[in-house]
RNA sequence: UGGGGAAUGGUGUAAUCGGUAGCACGACUGACUCUGGAUCAGUUAGUUGGGGUUCAAGUCCCUGUUCCCCAGCCA
């Protein structure tokens, strides 16, 4: 599955380290990882990197395991809806955690017992400082903090107070349990960090059993320890927390997993923070978490991205500690690479222009054979109806074409895909001068698409028979943001101001070949010469199919036009 | 200004003990083509600056520079 496991390629630094640990016996010959999401939002492509890493490493090693564990220590932000979506998305990506579905909340009793143990050992104390006071006492990046006035309470007093915290005797935020470490430590995480806070909130799993909740820092390392995780892989921002996890584990005298940090995924034209994605959803900038413009796995799925393409992408981007930003183009490449091999080809006209073939017999209909997938002969062929009146793509005709335009123009001959050679003989315009119809002639000798006299055409265009066309709606997507780095706060702009006003274009009145009346939902189709399109699972109806454009085909003509425009100017 | 990390073509990512800087995407040529798709062949372009050690430095030493993370009772 992973290129990293194939011969000839080298291991990334994490896999190299694990291989080393296996060799030296450091992890007891085991490889056990975990993917630890917080159920406070939907998974996105950045999580896919972590999922592929953790589950991938487990799969590559004999006997390797990867747990799914929800880090649900903050009931004010977490919901069952998110748990369900996360599980669905991981399965969809192609990974399986067996029966090892865990929750940090499963360990609340154990964590509480450990907190008591730390109090008894004189390593934790109840602090009455308010949140603001705690911050003031913490000091700054360059100045040490001061000891809390409550730091030297007796073990008995701490035990009593902590039990009463749990019993609900004190209001939210009035007290915390803190670790007694060092208020002058250069790593701020070590300046007597909060272990427990008072929080009256309904937890999605434990209900109202608790009114105190452990901090992530006091839960994460222990959760890994309980599950006997050998390699605890996480993102760079937790590097500063590693000394604290290790301190807790040491203080408690329990098993210590090895944490290894890597750089999270950044993508151009994309925001990846859950906070910002939540804002997009809540403020209605997108349709929801699964809006096809969202980088969420549910959005990508709805758009037509395949798990295979996403996994291939995660494989290619590599794993390192350098904070990099991947070009969106690489993701599109992975999409096209997968879809080109597997997508069934069909013909669809997005912006129809009517064509009447004047020398074609009135009322005649032919069934022409079309290849389903030129990349895979096993996919066979289908019959496509042809008639006197067709629709072609508006972009495939120009009345006054520039030099390198190969398609249809007055007097010019092109091939209709799988059909006949067609020559434009006339143009019909409306009162405003807009071309509304083409008059054409066809060469009956070229049925199937080849001329017996061997003459060539410069272009082949797609078409749909007007009499048989299915009307459909097509949604074209562009990047959600118009700036390459929407997160860049340099000019004081909010990321919302960088939303791309043209990220969605809805096309109605599209003309689809008849087989698209009831579209498949397994894979996107390739609309020949246009791109890949997935039937929208929400909006599509039998009488009116709706398609999402997954990604365009590579388009050298569009690129040429762009270059011309850039050179010549408007 | 404290602490913790990181710097290899336009973008990512490799390079075993110090021994030919490789791969992918992009860009650019050309071939082929019933998708201006795909495919094939080729070109382009890089070791953060400055010193040092060495026959030989991306790699070792010294010294700068830049970027990221940390002052939630978020994760």
Image: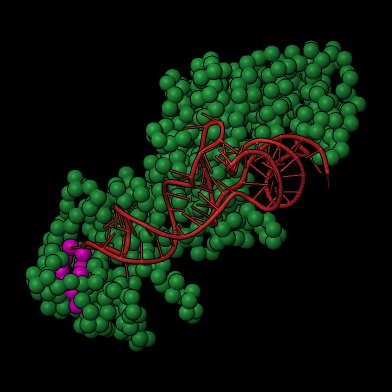
Chain colours: A green, B red
- Please indicate whether residue A283 sits to the left or right of residue A58 in the image: right
Residue drawn at the location 72% of the way across and 30% of the way down: A199
The percent position of residue A536, horizontal first and vertical second, equals 38, 51
Please tell me which residue lies in front, A359 or A536. A359
Q: Per the image, is A329 magenta?
A: no
Q: In the rendered structure, which segment of residues is drawn in magenta?
A: A415-423
Residue A183 shows in this picture? yes
The percent position of residue A389, horizontal first and vertical second, equals 19, 72
Residue drawn at the location 67% of the way across and 33% of the way down: A239
The percent position of residue A425, horizontal first and vertical second, equals 20, 83
Residue drawn at the location 75% of the way across and 19% of the way down: A167
- Please indicate whether residue B38 sits to the left or right of residue A485 in the image: left
Q: Per the image, is A422 magenta?
A: yes
Q: Quadrant of residue A228?
A: top right
Please tell me which residue lies in front, A243 or A102. A243
Q: How many labels does the image show?
A: 0
């Amino acid at each position: 599955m992973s290129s990293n496991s194939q011969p000839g390629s080298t291991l990334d630094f994490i896999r190299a380290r694990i291989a080393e640990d296996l060799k030296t016996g450091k992890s007891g010959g085991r490889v056990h990882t975990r993917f630890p999401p917080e159920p406070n939002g939907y998974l996105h492509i950045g999580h896919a990197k972590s999922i592929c890493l953790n589950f991938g490493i487990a799969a590559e090693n004999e006997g390797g395991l990867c747990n799914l564990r929800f880090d649900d220590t903050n009931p004010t932000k977490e919901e069952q809806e998110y748990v369900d979506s996360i599980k669905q998305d991981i399965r969809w990506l192609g990974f399986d955690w067996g029966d090892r579905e865990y929750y940090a909340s499963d360990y609340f009793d154990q964590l509480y017992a450990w907190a008591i143990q730390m109090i008894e050992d004189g390593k934790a104390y109840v602090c009455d400082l308010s949140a603001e006071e705690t911050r003031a006492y913490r000091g700054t990046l360059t100045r040490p903090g001061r000891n809390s006035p409550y730091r030297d309470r007796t073990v008995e007093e701490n035990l009593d107070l902590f039990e009463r915290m749990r019993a609900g005797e004190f209001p939210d935020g009035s007290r915390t349990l803190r670790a007694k470490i060092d208020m002058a430590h250069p790593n701020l995480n070590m300046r007597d960090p909060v272990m427990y806070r008072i929080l009256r909130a309904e937890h999605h799993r434990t209900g109202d059993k608790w009114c105190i909740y452990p901090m992530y820092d006091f839960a994460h390392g222990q959760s890994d320890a309980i599950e006997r995780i050998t390699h605890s892989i996480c993102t760079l921002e937790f590097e500063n927390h590693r000394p604290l996890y290790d301190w807790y584990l040491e203080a408690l005298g329990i098993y210590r997993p090895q944490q290894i940090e890597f750089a999270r995924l950044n993508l151009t034209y994309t925001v990846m923070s859950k906070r910002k994605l939540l804002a997009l959803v809540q403020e209605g900038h997108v349709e929801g978490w699964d809006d096809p413009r969202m980088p969420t796995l549910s959005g990508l799925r709805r758009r037509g991205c395949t798990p295979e393409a996403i996994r291939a992408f995660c494989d290619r981007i590599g794993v390192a500690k350098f904070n990099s930003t991947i070009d969106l183009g690489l993701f599109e490449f992975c999409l096209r690479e997968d879809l080109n091999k597997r997508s069934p080809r069909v013909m669809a006209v997005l912006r129809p222009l009517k064509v009447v073939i004047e020398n074609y017999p009135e009322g005649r209909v032919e069934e022409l054979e079309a290849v389903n997938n030129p990349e895979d002969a096993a996919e066979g062929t289908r019959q496509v109806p042809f008639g006197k009146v067709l629709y072609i793509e508006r972009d495939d005709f120009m009345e006054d074409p520039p030099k390198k335009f190969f398609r249809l123009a007055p007097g010019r001959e092109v091939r209709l895909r799988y059909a006949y050679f067609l020559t434009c003989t006339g143009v019909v315009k409306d009162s405003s001068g807009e071309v509304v119809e083409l008059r054409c002639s066809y060469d009956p000798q070229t049925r199937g698409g080849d001329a017996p006299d061997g003459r060539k055409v410069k272009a082949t265009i797609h078409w749909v028979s007007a009499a048989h066309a299915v009307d459909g709606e097509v949604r074209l997507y562009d990047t959600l943001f118009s700036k390459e780095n929407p997160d860049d706060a340099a000019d004081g702009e909010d990321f919302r101001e960088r939303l791309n006003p043209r990220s969605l274009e809805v096309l109605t009145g599209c003309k689809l070949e008849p087989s698209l009346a009831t579209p498949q939902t397994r894979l996107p189709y390739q609309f020949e010469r246009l791109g890949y399109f997935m039937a929208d699972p929400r909006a599509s109806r039998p009488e009116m199919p709706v398609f999402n454009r997954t990604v365009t085909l590579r388009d050298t003509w569009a690129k040429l036009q762009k270059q011309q425009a850039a050179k010549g100017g408007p």
